[in-house]
Amino acid sequence: MFTSPWAVALSAIFIWWFSTGILLWRVRHADNRGPDAHMASVVLGLPLLFGGIFGFSHTLADISVSGVYLAFLSALAIWAWIELAFLSGVITGPNTGPCPRFSSEGERFLRAIGAIAWHESLLIVVLSGMALHAHGAANPFGLWTFLVLFIARISAKLNLFFGVPYINTEFLPSAISHIATYFRKSRMNGLFPLSVTFLTFATGCWVERALASADVGRAVGFWLLAALTALALLEHWFMVLRLQDQKLWRWMMPAPRDAAEPRPGLTDESRHGL
């Protein structure tokens, strides 16, 4: 049932939508209760991290359909906990203040890195550990899932730094509201065409591998990667097309407690941004 390309793609889309919604809901709920609730979320979410690590390790030799799905879910679980820690303001970076107005490009870049340094470093460490652990494994799809998420994130952050037309900060929690001052709104940047071209090419490569795979488990794995990469591509296009993607999750969000309070704003091309 869950081996046809359409079933695999729909499964990946649902998992992406549902997991993103749960993460955003939990962060908003904690945001309304205060800083201690954010730390509690991260601590109580540790079973998600440990479960992801366990699932990733125990599926490396299992290339069955169930093994591939579990590897995919395990990588997402690890990623979700790290994102929870970031959105909660627990693992971010040494720079916790807004970007000064009229900063030079070099200073903006260094400050932007400082705002997310610990989080990005953790992602690199985890990715490196997964790569070492999965070297030569029969089922590398957990590693590749995490790698797709990592590359898509770096690409998105760089595009936000150089500037894109549309940036959604509706779900940005107060713990990292200063991050918004490192975003830049502009008509376009030179990296964006390269980003979407690469993600489109990667999606095509995964599809080709899925079609060429004689083993059903590997085919499912490549279809999952193709769907995930296509979703990353779609999220990039959300930055340049006026699409109300936040409506996918807005209906499940509790109202923010500080909705009337001003938050650090975005900047235009003549000022600073991430």
Image: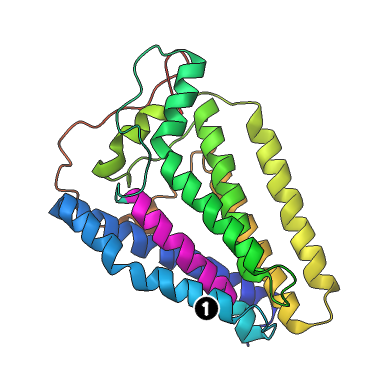
Above or below 219: residue 169:
above
Which residue is found at the position 54% from the left and 47% from the top?
153
Q: Residue 265 placed where, x, y %? A: 31, 27
| Side of 107 where 95 appears, left or right | left
Above or below 71: residue 228:
above
Which residue is found at the position 51% from the left and 23% from the top?
186
Which residue matches tag 1? 55
Q: How many neighbours does mark 1 have within 10 angstroms: few (below 14), some (14-19), or many (20 or more)?
A: many
| Side of 116 where 178 appears, left or right | left
Q: Residue 127 placed where, x, y %? A: 58, 57
Q: Three-letter amino acid code at disc 1? A: Gly
Label 1 secondary element: helix
Query: Is residue 172 located in the magenta-colored stretch of the structure?
Result: no
Query: Is residue 78 located in the magenta-colored stretch of the structure?
Result: yes
Q: Residue 39 placed where, x, y %? A: 23, 56
| Side of 19 where 74 appears, left or right | right
Which residue is found at the position 26% from the left and 43% from the top?
175
Above or below 120: residue 265:
above
Of residues 192 and 128, the one drawn nearer to the viewer in this rendering: 128
Of residues 170 and 128, the one drawn nearer to the viewer in this rendering: 128
